[in-house]
Image (cartoon, rainbow, N blue to C red):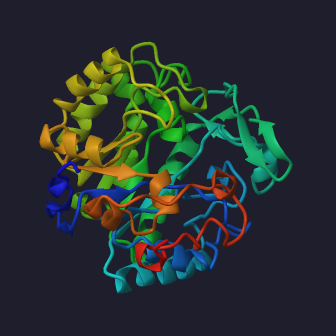
Amino acid sequence: MADHATLFTPIQMGPVTLPNRILMAPLTRNRAHDDGTPWEVAQTYYAQRASAGMILSEATQVTPLGKGYIKTPGIHAPEHVTAWKKITDAVHANGGRIYMQLWHVGRISHNSLLPEGETPQAPSAIRAETQTFTHNGFEDCSEPHAVTKEEIATLIEDYRKGAQNAKDAGFDGVEIHAANGYLIDQFLQDGSNKRDDEYGGSVENRMRFLREVIDAVTSVWDRDRVGVRLSPLSQANAISESDPEGTFSEVYKMLSDQKLAYLHVVESFYGAETKTDEEERLKRMRKLYDGFYIANGDLNADRLTQAIESGHADAGTIGRPFIANPDLPQRMRLGADLNAQDQDTFYGGDEKGYIDYPFLDQIKPV
């Protein structure tokens, strides 16, 4: 059995001590109430996984206009804060640490999901050639409108309020979701940002919205409790960029100068083969970021150990295996078999496939 002791070496991430390097990735489960209040059973779900080095919450919208899928949670109303506080208390009671991922989907939305049937918000009025999940099933994304400067100012305030609400809800920190083709990523990439004002055109201008969101969030939280998630080579949600390495090299350098808690990078997607040239680009960009680095992308114990021991990453987030294995770190420590995943219950549903996966000590020997 390979030696994975590195994964269980504690490490400091700002003021937070991570007992292991196996972090739980943000995982949309589509089980919140329609008003954005987390489902009560989420207290059990997250508490079961408290042995992760750190939990990142499912993506959580900072405004009703940031919603893009049914039954995703929010952090923009008092009832959201109350419900999330019960979740963070449950995680902390089990010895865990939990950060909230702050989210706005931008153009990856549908009119029916927004409070008054509004058009989705985006940097430019370019419809995403993809679908989202509504009460009618999968539907084409609606055409967005280009946000005005006044709307941008409101959006930045939405992030600040979301950050404050996350703090009031007892989270240990927050992550700004700037990946996977959602709003901030739409500003960063030139396929979705055709603006001719100070938020478009040059890379410096396209980074402006992310910088201003960081300023807003760090007016609430200390910088060493704020992270950012990027997906520099992804084309998720119909995102595109003419010069990914050139653009994101500048983003990495900007984030390095920000001295935040960490940079969290989606390096590959589940089931997608990472090409050699992509690996090389990721390595080159990694050298531009001086700080705590969290890798993500179809990781297992062997790949995460190699990433840490090579100096590429300090920790890694793991997604699907954490859904099916609430005690994933213990299983990795022992080299134990993993529970089979029930993909039919990943998104939406009831307690089945949510809180009923067994722990190792619940499995009876054959």
Q: Position of residue 121 (x, y in %)?
A: 64, 40
Q: Is residue 115 above or below residue 145?
A: below
Q: How many marks?
A: 0
* Occupied quadrant, residue 329: bottom left
Residue at (16%, 30%) from the top-left corner? 287
Residue at the extreme front:
366
Drawn side of residue 100 relative to residue 204, left or right: right
Drawn side of residue 101 relative to residue 16, left or right: right
Q: Nearer the viewer, residue 35 or 204?
A: 35
Residue at (63%, 56%) from the top-left corner? 342
Residue 173 at least partly seen? no
Q: Position of residue 69 (x, y in %)?
A: 69, 51
Residue at the extreme right:
136
Residue at (37%, 86%) from the top-left corner? 93
Q: Is residue 24 above or below residue 266?
A: below
Q: Position of residue 106 (x, y in %)?
A: 60, 41
* Occupied quadrant, residue 16: bottom left
Q: Position of residue 234 (x, y in %)?
A: 47, 28
Residue at the extreme bottom:
93
Residue 50 at least partly seen? yes
Q: Nearer the viewer, residue 242 or 236?
A: 236
* Occupied quadrant, residue 100: bottom left
Drawn side of residue 37 relative to residue 286, left or right: right
Drawn side of residue 43 relative to residue 1, left or right: right
Q: Is residue 337 above or below residue 184?
A: below
